[in-house]
Amino acid sequence: MRSARTLACVILLVVCVLSLAANWIAPAGYAKQFREAPGAPPSTQHWLGTDEIGRDRFARVLYGTRISLLLAPAAALVSTLLAAALGGLAGYVGGIWLRLATGFTDLFLSLPWLFLLITIRALLPLNASPFVSVLITFLILGLLGWAASARVLATGAHTLRSSDFVLQARASGVRGFRLFAVHVLPNLKPILYAQFWISIPVFILSEANLGILGLGVAEPLPSWGGLLRELEGMISFRDEPWRLVPLILLIVVMTSFQTLLSNETEEVAA
Amino acid sequence: MLWRIARHLLAIVGLVLVGGLISATLIRLAPGFDTDERQLNPNLNAESVRVLHDARNSEHNVVKFYISYLRGALHGDLGISHALEQPIQSLLRDRWRVTARVAGFGLLLGWLLAVSLAFSVSLARSSGCELVGTAISGAFLCIPAAVLALLSVILNSPGYLAISLIVFPKVYRYSRNLLAKAYAMPHITAARARGLGELRILLWHALPVVAPQLLTLAGITVSIAVGASIPVESLCGLPGIGQLAWQAALARDLPLLVNVTILVTLVTLLANSGADVIVHMTRSRQA
């Protein structure tokens, strides 16, 4: 298990470094068109060939990986902070606030995640600039993905509320937000970290789903969702197997995350 | 028991009503809600354009729209879809069968695959089998639902296969974990020490322990299957509720999307509450 975790760490590190170094490694920019070679097969000039409008696929994979791998943690941070603020505070205050927060969370969780995500994204502008589309996509993930984490945090905070050290702090005169920020929140850290790490692969997959449906990051900016959309034009796997590279990379990265997460969640459970 | 069912029903009605109102508000606030492509049609005269404009105006106040919608729904009138220009009732009636078939078969196949693999791994009791099971489920867990839908189009396989492969890894992982915990219980060790066969231990001693949790999971997987039906139906060209939701969202079709949201929320909540009530009934009978 330890060697699997080390391997997962190395894979994630290599993928991150390569994507961050895209400006130096990639043979061209992600939007540069080689008009003389549209849909070209792999060659020494274009390692993964070119797409239908002649853009270097290897460059797009590198830049796309950078966008997905950098912004999914950012969205996870937003959702974890929201969950901490809503769930953590409601669990700490208890009473009617806890019941209200639970009802609101139930409402969010009563809708299937994909249904909620796709519907809300489709309602927002679809002809936005690439930069705005990136912001919209990942902000939606962050703003909608807090419910499950909030429920876990509410339970955690509610349990801590009646713990000995909180009672002692209260007896010493510590009250209100200070009690929450100084004594309760630090003890919720393991749950917060676990929820943060669990959210990252979920958001990467969600962005991929949105991208394939044409609701993700707008062209010409690449992302894993947009790259996987290329599969739509495939007739069989034998003709152009190199088009499967983004999918294989996504599976490798997600497996690495899973390997790391299984350990993280085990530690929190312990 | 009756009180429990009544409480569930009350919660379902409350959540469905609030969910419908929130979805109506979101659609009303969505950019482009006011525009109607038909108003740009040069063949329409000023009177027709005015009628179209007035029709949209009636939806400007969300609360008024929602109250009139609920009043109509109580009399069996769910409104008219702006985008498809058809009564919503007939649209839902035509399409729910497709979704029920795709999601139903998908769920059945996904559960069958997951439970058979989890049982086989438990019976085999070998780390090799465990690794194979984890690898297969892990691989499918890493593939986005929309990619599975695309792959099923490329491979010319039915849409329910994609849904089953979305459901399978989640059910497998959860049921395998539950079985592993059940196998660590003292009564299983005692049964094994008395020389009981593995199949008998699984069916008589481990399965009854994990059955309530599996039943709860069944309710949750309905929600997963319904959610997955949007990309699967949209990409595979299946005319179901998922595809309808997709079209309604893209066209900012307020009446249609409110109805679809209410329907999806209702199905999800009924599945979850149904599973909860059955589990409670089984437990109280055992007690």
Image: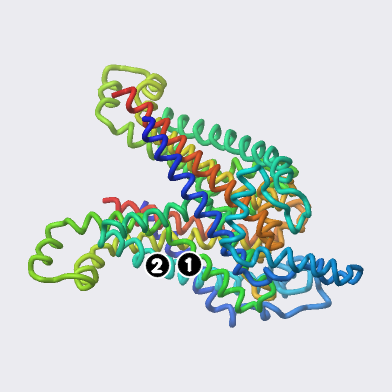
How crowded pointer 1 is (Cα within 10 Å; few <14, some 14-19, many 20+) is rated as many
Question: Which residue is rendered at x = 39% and y = 31% of the image?
Answer: B279
Mark drawn on residue B248: none
Q: Is residue B173 above or below residue B144?
A: above
Q: Position of residue B209 (x, y in %)?
A: 35, 29
Q: Is residue B20 left or right of residue B127?
A: right
Q: Earlier in the sequence, mark 1 or mark 2?
A: 2
Do labels 1 and 2 touch, CB within 8 Å? yes
Q: Is residue B94 left or right of residue B275?
A: right
Residue A16 in percent (x, y) is at 50, 71
Q: Nearer the viewer, residue A253 or A10?
A: A253
Under tag 2, what secondary structure? helix
Residue B68 visible somewhere in the drawing: yes
Residue A249 visible in the current orientation: no
Q: Name the mark on residue A82.
A: 2
The disc labelled 1 sits on which kind of residue?
Answer: Gly
Residue B61 picture quarter: bottom right
Task: Choose top left, top right, bottom left or bottom right for residue B55.
Answer: bottom right
Q: Disc 1 on helix, strand or loop?
A: helix
Displayed quadrant of residue A206: bottom right
Q: Residue A144: x, y in percent?
A: 49, 63
- Give the x, y percent position of residue B19: 52, 54
Callout 2: residue from which chain?
A: A
Image side of residue A172 versus residue B81, left or right: left
For the residue pair B37 and A178, the one nearer the viewer reads as B37
Disc 1 marks which residue? A142
Question: Which kind of residue does numbered mark 2 sit on?
Answer: Leu
Give me the chain letter of mark 1. Answer: A
Residue B141 vertical position relative to residue B8 in the rendered view, above or below: below
Q: Is disc 2 surrounded by few (<14), some (14 to 19) or many (20+) residues within 10 Å?
A: many
